[in-house]
């Protein structure tokens, strides 16, 4: 039950995250500098939660290094890609495409872990592809939509599929408190994003940081809460249970975009249908994997 509850909350949180990032970009926040706001703010959220829960007396530092390394990839490197996908494709369409992560997770498990390809995976794959086709066949799209944003969202789905399997495997072999595991992942994310910006945007970082801090802090708080729920879910349940429920972020992204962003997202019946198909396909894949 805990895995189901936390996975559902994670899906809601990540759906909301896409919209808060879009709002931050609309206020003029720099998309790359915003990534260095997201991860540290989320890290502080997880650290405060772990301290309040009294977890520091129940962990061996050696149990956390795997989570820090995973954090370099997701949500570290993926955070920059994620923000760009929302900037170029919009929150609703990026969230739908990221919802194919359960399919990616299942395919990776078959290819590298030797898990069997069952009928549910094949049917679920067809449903997910149908959702992508529905989205690709849209006639009316927002003016800001770019195909590169869709590609970035699919790259995020690949990263998230890898992350889910790595976190679950790490949680089974080491057993740190989930809140501290979350903090370790977000610390790793903060380190890789900072290193990237110091190399690529060093001269502009100081000038853009203060506006980005104001714009992206709500997104950082949202990421912290959502990531805590995800790590808690993966600590209590299998990837096949958690990943499909987390993929409901596709529907939440569409709902929140319609409520917050409004008409500029141009959410029509085809967009909603695409979100429903992706979530349904991901749920079937997870249930039968």
Image (tube, rainbow, N blue to C red):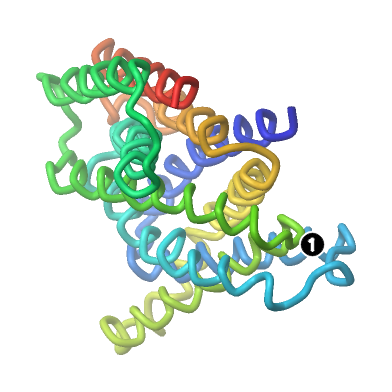
- Crowd band around label 1 with a 10 angstrom C-alpha radius: few (<14), some (14–19), many (20+): many
Instruction: Tell whether 73 sits left or right of 128.
Output: right
Quarter of the image where the C terminus is located? top left
Q: Residue at x 37, y 65 (%)?
A: 77
Q: Which residue is mark 1?
A: 50
Q: Is residue 193 above or below residue 236?
A: below
Instruction: Tell whether 126 sits left or right of 253.
Output: left
Q: Residue 207 falls in which quadrant of the image?
A: bottom left
- Give how far across and how far down residue 276 sits, in percent: 37, 16
Q: Residue at x 29, y 15 (%)?
A: 123
284 or 5, nearer to the observer = 284
- Give how far across and how far down residue 160 sits, in percent: 41, 48
Instruction: Tell whether 88 sits left or right of 118.
Output: left
- Give how far across and how far down residue 124 sits, in percent: 33, 19
SS assignment at label 1 = helix
Q: Residue at x 54, y 34 (%)?
A: 11
Q: Residue at x 18, y 41 (%)?
A: 144
Q: Residue 145 falls in which quadrant of the image?
A: top left
89 or 226, nearer to the observer = 226
């Amino acid at each position: 039950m805990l895995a189901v509850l936390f996975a559902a909350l994670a899906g809601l949180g990540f759906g909301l995250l896409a919209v808060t990032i879009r709002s931050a970009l609309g206020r003029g926040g720099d998309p790359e500098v915003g990534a260095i706001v997201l991860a540290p703010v989320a890290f502080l959220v997880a650290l405060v939660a772990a301290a309040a829960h009294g977890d520091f007396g129940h962990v061996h530092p050696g149990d956390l290094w795997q989570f820090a390394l995973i954090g370099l990839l997701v949500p570290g490197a993926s955070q920059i890609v994620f923000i760009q996908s929302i900037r170029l494709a919009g929150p609703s369409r990026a969230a739908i495409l990221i919802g194919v992560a359960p399919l990616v997770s299942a395919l990776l498990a078959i290819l590298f872990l030797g898990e069997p390809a069952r009928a549910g995976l094949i049917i679920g794959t067809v449903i997910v592809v149908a959702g992508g086709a529905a989205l690709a066949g849209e006639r009316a799209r927002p003016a800001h939509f770019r195909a590169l944003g869709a590609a970035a969202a699919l790259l995020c789905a690949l990263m998230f599929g890898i992350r889910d399997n790595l976190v679950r495997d790490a949680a089974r072999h080491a057993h740190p408190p989930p809140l501290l595991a979350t903090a370790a992942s977000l610390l790793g994310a903060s380190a890789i994003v900072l290193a990237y910006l110091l190399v690529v945007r060093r001269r502009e970082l100081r000038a853009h940081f203060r506006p980005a801090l104001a714009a992206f802090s709500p997104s950082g708080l949202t990421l912290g809460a959502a990531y805590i729920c995800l790590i808690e879910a993966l600590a209590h349940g299998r990837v096949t249970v958690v990943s499909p429920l987390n993929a409901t972020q596709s529907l939440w992204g569409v709902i929140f975009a319609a409520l917050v962003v409004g008409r500029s997202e141009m959410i029509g019946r085809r967009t909603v249908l695409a979100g429903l198909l992706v979530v349904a396909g991901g749920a079937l894949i997870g249930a039968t994997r």
